[in-house]
Amino acid sequence: MATAQITPDNDAVLAEVLVAAPPARVFEAITDPRQTAQWWGQKGMYRIIESQGDVRPGGKWSTRGRGDDGTEFTVHGEYLEIDPPRLLVHTWNPSFSKIRETVVRWELEPQEVHGLHQQGPHKVGTGTLVRIRHSGFAGNIEGVKSHSEGWKRVLGWMQAFVESGKTVDATTGVT
């Protein structure tokens, strides 16, 4: 289950989730626009209808989405740092919020996944601890709170997609 907290200065959201897949698979899901459009959203809430990205430092990315009520929105930015499959840093400029440009830092850390057998625990694969730091809210309490809740949902959707192939149409109430 994804968790999120707000830093004491109300400048950043810190969110994380453990995904039962290797970092390369998770990195692909968050950087491939075709895949992002499949999992970023939830039936009855909103969905991404167009996604583009030039995944390189200085490259631009953008998404266009539509809420369940038909309202369209955009989010766009620029990639600042990329170190596949461990790190992705980009700016974040949403049309739906009155926040100024912020920065999202994705850190993907490999984690051994263990299973229990008669002989005791043993490694069954590699998972990924995904950590997000979304900073630059500068005390905008409304913006940081809404993005904190948003990142819990987004990480849950990404986890469900990577682990079991759940798309926006199959995702209801994942948090």
Image (cartoon, grey):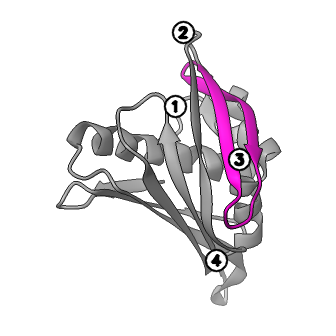
Looking at numbered disc 2 in the image, what kind of residue is underneath it?
Answer: Asp
Say the numbered circle drawn on residue 113.
4
List the residue tagged with mark 3: 161
In the image, residue 172 sits, relative to residue 67, either above or below, namely: below
Q: How far apart are marks 2 and 4 (CA)?
A: 41 Å
Residue in the image at 50% along x and 42% along y: 93
Mark 1 or mark 2, whichever is nearer to me: 2
Mark 1 or mark 4, whichever is nearer to me: 1
> What is the span of residues highlighted in magenta in the rendered image?
43-66
List the residue tagged with mark 1: 173
> Could you tell me residue 139's position as x and y percent?
20, 50
Say the numbered circle drawn on residue 69.
2
Chain-order first, disc 2 or disc 3? 2
Q: Mark 4: give few (<14), some (14-19) or many (20+) Cα within 10 Å.
A: some
Seen as rendered, the residue at the extreme left is 8
**Residue 94 visible in this rendered orientation of the protein:** yes
Q: Distance between the residues labelled 1 and 2?
A: 17 Å
Residue in the image at 70% along x and 77% along y: 126
Q: Do the residues labelled 2 and 4 touch (CB within 8 Å)?
A: no
Which sits in the foreground, 127 or 7? 7
> Could you tell me residue 63's position as x and y percent?
66, 36
